[in-house]
Structures are given as structure tokens and as C-alpha cells.
Image (spheres, helix red, strand yellow):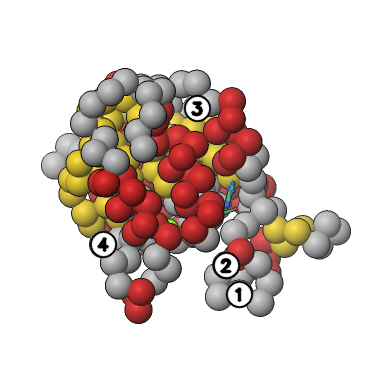
């Protein structure tokens, strides 16, 4: 099938550090291929670039641009003492996480620097100045309730009608995982501005049903 991840970039995605199962990455790749001809796609939560490779591969295939936002200091669950901590990602002098150098290396090795642009900063700061209609928004940033909700509030309304909202780590049952992404999914559905589409694993896609980019979505 022509919408599949090209083998060379699949190898890079597999080798990259991160939190993106292969079937979900392939799904994200297909969604981005559909949408990128209509405008830029935005990812919130770059980390070391694993999902950015799936998105960037779509841009290489069909054209268009992927933007990816992260402050590169890690989420709560990435900090020392937490489940998803990786000590090799700490800047020892600052005593802070810094995933930006690893991300840049990952992107360069994959040959995707022309296709993916890093936006370095807090998602709320970036959202304040955002004015660009988006063909696709992928929410995979901070998974605490406040961060996940802020990411929806900051960017979902920039999705064009017919565009795609993708939310990662959606678990309906608390015993399967944190609830914030599920709450964001519920908020999108309840807003009446988004309609559920396909789901693969914990990745859920929705389509914006009406309005225009920049109009409130609720
Ligand atoms: N998509 C990645 C995983 C992202 S992990 C992959 O495929 O592997 C979540 C990321 O969100 C972390 O890198 C963290 O630094 C970032 N993050 C958390 N809260 C944020 C915020 N408020 N603004 C910007 N980035 C944030
Ligand atoms: Mg995730």
C-alpha cells in the first residue's frame, strides 16, 4: 500500500528513543499523509523525535511541513524518580532534562530536517502567538490534566474544517492509564466541533466538522 511508512524511515523510527508503538506511529503517518496537502501539521510533545519521524516521513512523501512543539525539559513523568525517567537525557550542569540535542540528532540522521521544524518552548507560550490554520494537530505533550487541557484550548481551534485532531494515550479505564487524554477526547466530542474517526491502540483521531480555523471550538 502506498500510504505505508517507507522502510528507511521506519528503521529510524524504530531506533529512536520515545513512546510510540509501531502500529500507532503508522496510523499517525497515514493521517498526516492525508492531511499535509491541505496545510501544516502540528505536534505537541516532541521528546526525542520518534513520532516526529512518522510525521516527517509523511511530509517527505507528499510535501508540506510538520511543526513540533516542546520545551524539551520533560514532563512530570520523565523527571528523576518517575517511571519514564532516562538519566542519559539530563544536562548535568543545569540539573535539567534536555531532549533537544537528541531530537536534533535523530532528525538529522533520518534526513528529515527539511520537513520538520522544531518549535522550542512551553506549549501555552507558543499557543499565545499561534495564528496559523492547521491541517492536523497531534496532542502528545504533558499528560497532567492541566497541560493536556491547555494543549486542546491552545491549538484545537486552529484545525481547519475537515482537519484532524489526534490524541495519544487515550485510556477509557483508569486501570489502563492516566485519564487526562481521555478527558480531552470527551471534551472534543462534547464540543460538537469534532466527530470521532478511527482509533488504533491508544491513539484516537477526530475530524473537525465545521466552523473555520481560529473560531472557538468549545
Ligand atoms: N511524541 C513523543 C513523546 C512525547 S513525551 C514520542 O513519540 O516519543 C511528552 C513531551 O511533552 C515531553 O518531551 C515534554 O517535555 C513535553 N511537554 C510536557 N509539557 C509541556 C508543555 N507544557 N509545553 C511544551 N512541552 C511539554
Ligand atoms: Mg504519548
Q: Are marks 1 and 2 in contact (CB under 8 Å)?
A: yes
**Marks 4/1: CA distance?**
24 Å
Q: Earlier in the sequence, mark 4 or mark 2?
A: 2
- Residue occupying the point 61% across, 64% down: 76
Q: Earlier in the sequence, mark 4 or mark 3?
A: 3
**Marks 4/3: CA distance?**
30 Å
**Whether residue 130 is situated above or below residue 137 in the rendered picture:** above
Q: Mark 3 points at which residue?
A: 114
Could you say where residue 23 lies in the image, as x and y percent from the top left? 27, 58
Q: Name the residue under label 4.
A: 201
Q: Which of marks 1 and 2 is nearer the N terminus?
A: 2
- Residue occupying the point 57% across, 41% down: 123
**Marks 1/3: CA distance?**
34 Å
Q: How many tags in the picture? A: 4
2 or 3: mark nearer the eye: 2
Could you say where residue 62 lies in the image, as x and y percent from the top left? 29, 26
- Give the crowd class for mark 4: few <14, some 14-19, many >=20 residues within 10 Å: few
Q: Name the residue under label 2.
A: 77
Q: Do the residues labelled 1 and 3 touch (CB within 8 Å)?
A: no
Q: Earlier in the sequence, mark 2 or mark 3?
A: 2
Q: Tell me the SS state at disc 3.
A: loop
**Marker disc for residue 82:** 1
Could you say where residue 57 lies in the image, as x and y percent from the top left? 36, 38
Amino acid at each position: 500500500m502506498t500510504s505505508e511508512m517507507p522502510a528507511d524511515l521506519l528503521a529510524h523510527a524504530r531506533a529512536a528513543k520515545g513512546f510510540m508503538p509501531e502500529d500507532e506511529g503508522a496510523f499517525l503517518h497515514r493521517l498526516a499523509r492525508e492531511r499535509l496537502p491541505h496545510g501544516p501539521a502540528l505536534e505537541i510533545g516532541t521528546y526525542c523525535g520518534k513520532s516526529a519521524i512518522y510525521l516527517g516521513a509523511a511530509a517527505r512523501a507528499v510535501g508540506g511541513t510538520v511543526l513540533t512543539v516542546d520545551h524539551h525539559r520533560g514532563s512530570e513523568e520523565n523527571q528523576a524518580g518517575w517511571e519514564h525517567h532516562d538519566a542519559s537525557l539530563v544536562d548535568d550542569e543545569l540539573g535539567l532534562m534536555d531532549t533537544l540535542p537528541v531530537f536534533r540528532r535523530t532528525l538529522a540522521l533520518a534526513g528529515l530536517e527539511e520537513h520538520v521544524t522544531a518549535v522550542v518552548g512551553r506549549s501555552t507560550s507558543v499557543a499565545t502567538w499561534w495564528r496559523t490554520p492547521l491541517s492536523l494537530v497531534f496532542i502528545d505533550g504533558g499528560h497532567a490534566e492541566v497541560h493536556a487541557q491547555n494543549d486542546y484550548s491552545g491549538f484545537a481551534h486552529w484545525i481547519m474544517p475537515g482537519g484532524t485532531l489526534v490524541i495519544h494515550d487515550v485510556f477509557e479505564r483508569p486501570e489502563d492509564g492516566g485519564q487526562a487524554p481521555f478527558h480531552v477526547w470527551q471534551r472534543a466530542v462534547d464540543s460538537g466541533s469534532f466527530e470521532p474517526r478511527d482509533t488504533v491502540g491508544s491513539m484516537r483521531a477526530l475530524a473537525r466538522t465545521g466552523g473555520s480555523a481560529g473560531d472557538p471550538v468549545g
